[in-house]
Amino acid sequence: MAVRATATAKNTMQKYERLLLTGAAGGLGRVLREGLRPCGRILRLSDIAPLGAASEGEELMPCDLADKSAVDALVRGCDAIVHLGGLATEHAFEQILEANIKGAFHVYEAARRHGVRRVVFASSNHVTGFHPVGQPLDAESPRRPDSYYGLSKCFGEDLARFYFDRYGVETACVRIGSCFPEPRDRRMLITWLSYRDLTDLVRCCLAAPRVGHTVVYGVSKNRDAWWDNSGAAHLRFEPRDSSEPWRERIESQPTAESGDPATQYQGAGFVQAGPFETPPAETPKTPKETS
């Protein structure tokens, strides 16, 4: 597959012939749909949600990631994949299984079959969400998933490791922090990732000459930090934004109650979401006889 190279300030940007973006209709997918246009001659966009009209240089291919044959067709002809597709919050395990676990397997198996050599996998900080607040972490720290969602991202990272070791498919696993237009609370003063920094990071993951199997935390240059990205220095990602402009407003908000688990663990509310069992049907009562 043809890959052209054009110069950038940091890395030699690889201009892919056809770059696939899954989850392109989601919040971050819409950001990257715009931001990744310089990275591919053709940007193939996929989601199960409506994608709108195609712009110049775009291909629209709606796809259910749980459908293996559909994913195989989706990946055919692509040079690289940015995989955002799947559920982005906590759900019942059965839903996570279809979208996030089966979906990730189908993407990697299709990548193997069609010779895709580079994947950027949208992992999450929730793979380490049960570490206590303030605990410094890096890519080698033990994973402590805080949810079924976090478990699915652990599976995706291991899947990426396996497909690199066995088949040579390189992956940058991006453990996305809190990616919103602006931070919303005290936790996000630490975990916030700006849209601009997200775009820069994904571009760096695509442009680096070699990524092997790399784990990198997606976080902006905030004053306080839990996560150390020194092991991903080869990506040459340098965040440009900071949560500091919002500090005064956020710190004026009321503090959470003492003892709230959401304030004790890095995964915040994810450590309390669920369970999602369907309540058992109530046993019908036997009507009382009347005299």
Image (cartoon, rainbow, N blue to C red):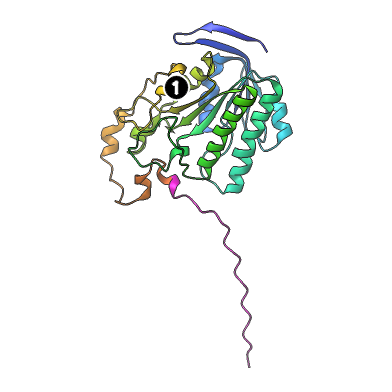
Q: Which residue is mark 1?
A: 232
Q: Residue at x 30, y 28 (%)?
A: 223
Which quadrant: the C terminus?
Answer: bottom right
Residue 26: x %, y % from top left:
55, 33
Which residue is the extreme one toward the front?
165
* 283 part of magenta stretch: yes
Q: Residues within 10 Å of mark 1 (few under 14, many from 20)?
A: some
- Against 240, residue 225 (above or below) is below
Q: Secondary structure at mark 1?
A: helix
Q: Residue at x 54, y 46 (%)?
A: 91
Give the magenta part as a residue range.
270-291
Indicate the quadrant where residue 283 lies: bottom right
Query: In the drawing, does residue 58 fall left or right of residue 276?
Result: right
Residue 73: x %, y % from top left:
72, 27
Residue 107: x %, y % from top left:
65, 30
Query: In the drawing, does residue 83 fall left or right of residue 258?
Result: right
* 199 part of magenta stretch: no
Task: Please name whichever residue, 49 or 39, is drawn nearer the observer in this view of the structure.
Answer: 39
| Residue 197 makes an appearance in the image | yes
Q: Amino acid at mark 1?
A: Ala
Indicate the quadrant where residue 82 lies: top right
| Residue 49 makes an appearance in the image | no
Indicate the quadrant where residue 231 lies: top left
Query: In the drawing, does residue 188 fall left or right of residue 285?
Result: left
Q: Main secondary structure of the magenta part?
A: loop
Which residue is the extreme one toward the bottom?
291
- Against 274, residue 213 (above or below) is above
Which quadrant: the N terminus?
Answer: top right
Residue 19: x %, y % from top left:
61, 19
- Against 273, residue 100 (above or below) is above
